[in-house]
Image: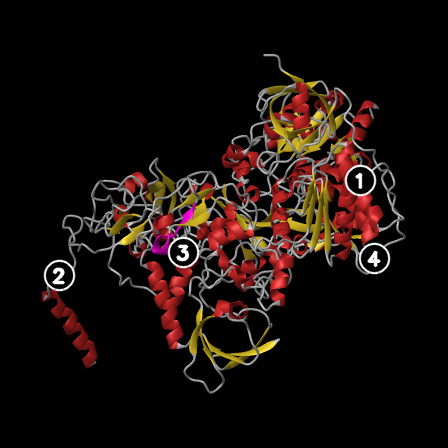
Amino acid sequence: MISLLRTMALTFLHMFRKRETIQYPEEKVVLHPRWRGRIVLTRDPDMGERCVGCYLCAAACPVDCISLQATEDEHGRRYPAFFRINFSRCIFCGYCEEACPTYAIQLIPDFEMAEYNRQNLVYEKEDLLIDGQGKYPGYNYYKVAGLAIGVKEKGEGDNEDPPIDIHSLLP
Amino acid sequence: MAVIYIDHRAYEVKAGKNLLESCLTLGFNLPYFCWHPAMGSVGACRQCAVKIFKDKDDTQGRLMMSCMEAVKDNMYLSISDPMAKAFRSQIIEWLMTNHPHDCAVCDEGGSCHLQDMTVMTGHAYRRFQYPKRTYKNQYLGPFINHEMNRCIQCYRCVRFYKDYAGGKDLDAFAAHDHIYFGRANDGVLENEFSGNLAEVCPTGVFTDKSLKEHYTRKWDMTMAPSICQHCSLGCNIIAGERYGELRQITNRYNGEVNGYFICDKGRFGYEFVNSMNRIQQPIIRSKIPEAVDKNTLYNHLKAAISNRNIIGIGSPRASLESNFALMQLVGKENFYQGISERDAQLMQTILHTINSGHVHTPSLKETESADAIFILGEDLTNAAPLLALTVRQAVQRRPFEKAQEIGIPSWHDAARREFAQEKKGPLFIAYPTKTKLDALADNCQHLSPDDIARLGFAIANLLNDTAPAPQEIDEDVLKIAQHIANTLKRAEKPLIICGTSLHNEAILKAVANIAVSLGSEDKKASVFYVVEECNSMGLAMMQAPSLEQARAALKMKEANTVIILENDLYRRDAKATIDHLFEQCGELIVLDHLHNATSNQATVLIPAATFAEAAGTLVNNEGRAQCFFQVFRPKNENFRESWRWLDEFRQFKKGASLEDLNEPGDLMAELVTLMPQFKGAEEAAPSADFRIAGQKIPREPHRYSGRTAMLANIQVSEPKPPEDSDSPLSYTMEGYRGIPPAPLTPFFWSPGWNSVQSVNKYQEEIGGAIRGGDTGKRLFQKVSAVEKIFFDDIPTAYQALPGEWLVIPLQHIFGSEELSIYTHGIAERTPHPYAVISRQDAEDLNINENQSIRVTIAEQDYELPATIRNELPSGLVGIPDHVSGLSGISWPAKGILKTIAS
């Protein structure tokens, strides 16, 4: 009996508490930068596509909703020929972002992706690619990778010695 | 056997092996780089360190490289000793100091031995902060990509390329930490086995360039066990698909056949599957439009097939199932081999010799242990490339055995090579021109085909004087014959290699005589036959008449509908003959993958599935039946297995209507009942209802990605994965994850071993058979030899008639085979057509090198640049077999040589 009354009292007291519910969509929810929402593909500081088509995001994806095909431009720079995320399957776990070695794929604080038609939740590369660096500015994968693909020549990257002259016997 | 103690536990291991092999055989995960099961140890990378103790009571121990230590009885060692572990992890850390940050864009990633070993040793964080060493790359041709920054200097590439495969244009350059592996200058890697560098290299220095064009990680491919279709050896391969396209061929270890390596034609020759030249739709030429759907085709064929006598022409490159389905459709009396009379005769001679019980047909692996080899009329490097590789190993066997006598173990690669130097075992070659293997041979005889046969007959006579001897044989040749005969007689495992490349029956008969003279009841002579196509032997075993007789039957108006199965007849016989054959046909129904000269003549053209889209059984040259499985369901539903089409037509013929077509029954079982010579072929792979723990075997690795997105652009609801009722393999990633039987191994993977090196875990012992037995069932029964019968139709010595030349086909690994030329890299490596003439003829006719000459064969003119060879006997002309339109010739051909007046 007492517990019943106590419960009613507690519930009654909640009327005077600060409200957690917000009047969405009139009122917008505050989302933090690391909130895991819609997935984007970013560009490097030179505005080149960051994605190098390594397939790690696709492999990490627990629901297998990422599918892509790597291809190369005339310099040998790898980029995705197509990049597809089926958001109707995506669980926004962020494993793809964790797996990405180039900071290309990022989850951003946006969840307003509702659609009436499920087919519209299939995002292609043109829907995913943004014109910016997202959360990690300044990183250019090809500057630190060993490949020479038009971004830099062999030995001109960060932390690289000039190419070895194989005819030299000097130490 | 020896007992060794690893971390205080006793294990029984084979004596004579090295510790690393033994540990891996026992299932331990011991990292290594420079050691390779086929190439032995050199102790270059220092990665496989273990701690070895003096005796049971020794607690101090010492670090040793396990690959350089022989197994000894009562040996105490520790793999998990903290010092050994730390040492291994530090070695990786050193190797990684210069390794670029490339994994994301490296084609090796996901099947990288260096990645696996780094994770295995636990090196996770880079402490070295100083700049990395860089190198400039080289262009190495259409097959192999070079990215030298990734090198960890294990020397495996040059050890494979130079020491194992006999290549000359890849080497180590520079000194100390500047070591560079590449060519002296940019250029195409010349060796026919260069593709193996992609598998031999533990990291991504050498990668598969054809894969790069449609790059897919190993874990993303749908893979199935398959058999190479490009020559008669039947190498086992793994074919991988992604997005409806065949993407990569890798080696599938088979201890009996191809071992660890395949040739470049096999590895890169797959692009015909994705070719634009594929027949996409059934075509009925009398209809407008020509391309029709399945139902129209069925209705048309129903009328064409029922109640009519049809002739079926089989194919040496189609599976047993397809050939058999055709035979069942047309009836045994109307089924013909799709090869010329001469070639059919050659195959009959081979089968006759094998069935006589006097010869043993060794497996490819067995040829590696031969200690005296005599090759008659074959250019192995081009006709059966991997055989050239095994012969290369066999030639080194004797000096290596000598090394063992002075205590150098067989796995101690550097030491035994140092000991052997340039010493070689006996190898004799008789071929009209120079071949690549000549460099290894004791003696090369450049003779005309008939003279090669005469040399063979002479040797047979010298081995056993009841064998007939050739008349009027040259004194010098006799001397050579004596030398070869003595060597073969002395040898413990003599091997004779011959084949059908020169289309000369006398050579095969001479070899049969040698085999009969050389062998005895308990020790039969080994003869390795090189035949033309992947299922030549299987087709020959069906014992059907040849094309010539099909033509005769057509002429007699016994039938006027012809079905041709996966066969471009213009490659089999003279153009005029085939034209004549086609003129006799009313309805010409052709099933094939690609448009070609024969399919252009068809009135009804039906698209057939390639090896990647079909399942089937092939019989290789040693009579081993092996199965290949469908890799993927093609997007184009018209790409159906020939046997499926043909079986439906059979049902039509029996009066079935369109609606009640059944799935084909068990064709192999039917084949074996009807033709007992194929007994055993049905057991070449487990049947379709085979399950392990109630599960199918998945074609996809467990990390396969993109399942719910790859088709989402078409329809967001995922379709049900296709079901495979024809095999125990499934099209999904679900199923049995352990080690399946060898014929059903779709890929090699083991926890912690993502690269192809995981094959270690599939073998009973390193370098031995796959667990549960290697792929394939040998069909040739053991026959006890009847009395010694010799062939006595010895040809006379070849004498060139004035104004007439004998034209011989010269095989080319790149270009001579029909399907592989659709790979543009292979097309790039294909030689330009040429005509080889002898120095004597060149002088007589006043022809200069590269001067255009006209070769007339059976009223067909070929204008070709002349190549003058000193060694070629005069009166012979060699032209590349089937290269760039040099088809439609009936071999052996007589030709007329003329200079072109400019």
Q: Are marks 3 and 1 in contact (CB under 8 Å)?
A: no
Segment tinted magenta in the rendering:
B175-182
Query: Does dot 4 land on a helix, a strand or a loop?
Result: loop
Q: Please report, as a chain letter, where disc 2 is located.
A: A
Residue at point 62%, 28% (across, down)? B868
Whether B176 is among the magenta residues is: yes
- Please give the residue where the numbered disc 2 appears in the rendered image: A19
Q: Amino acid at mark 1?
A: Glu
Query: Does dot 1 land on a helix, a strand or a loop?
Result: helix
Query: Does dot 2 land on a helix, a strand or a loop?
Result: loop
Q: Nearer the viewer, mark 3 or mark 1?
A: 1
Can residue B636 be seen in this snapshot? no
Q: Residue furthest bottom?
A: B57
Q: Position of residue A39 (x, y in %)?
A: 27, 49
Quadrant location of the C terminus of chain B? Answer: top right
Q: CA distance from mark 4 to mark 2?
A: 100 Å
Q: Position of residue A20 (x, y in %)?
A: 15, 61
| Front residue of B200 and B436 | B436
Query: Does dot 3 land on a helix, a strand or a loop?
Result: loop
- Please give the residue where the numbered disc 1 appears in the rendered image: B475
Comes first in the chain, label 3 or label 1:
3
B85 vs B646, left or right, is left
B62 vs A99, left or right, is right
Q: CA distance from mark 3 to mark 2?
A: 66 Å
Q: Are marks 4 and 1 in contact (CB under 8 Å)?
A: no
Comes first in the chain, label 4 or label 1:
1
Q: CA distance from mark 4 to mark 3?
A: 50 Å
**Mark number, residue B153:** 3
Q: Amino acid at mark 4?
A: Ser
Q: Amino acid at mark 3?
A: Gln
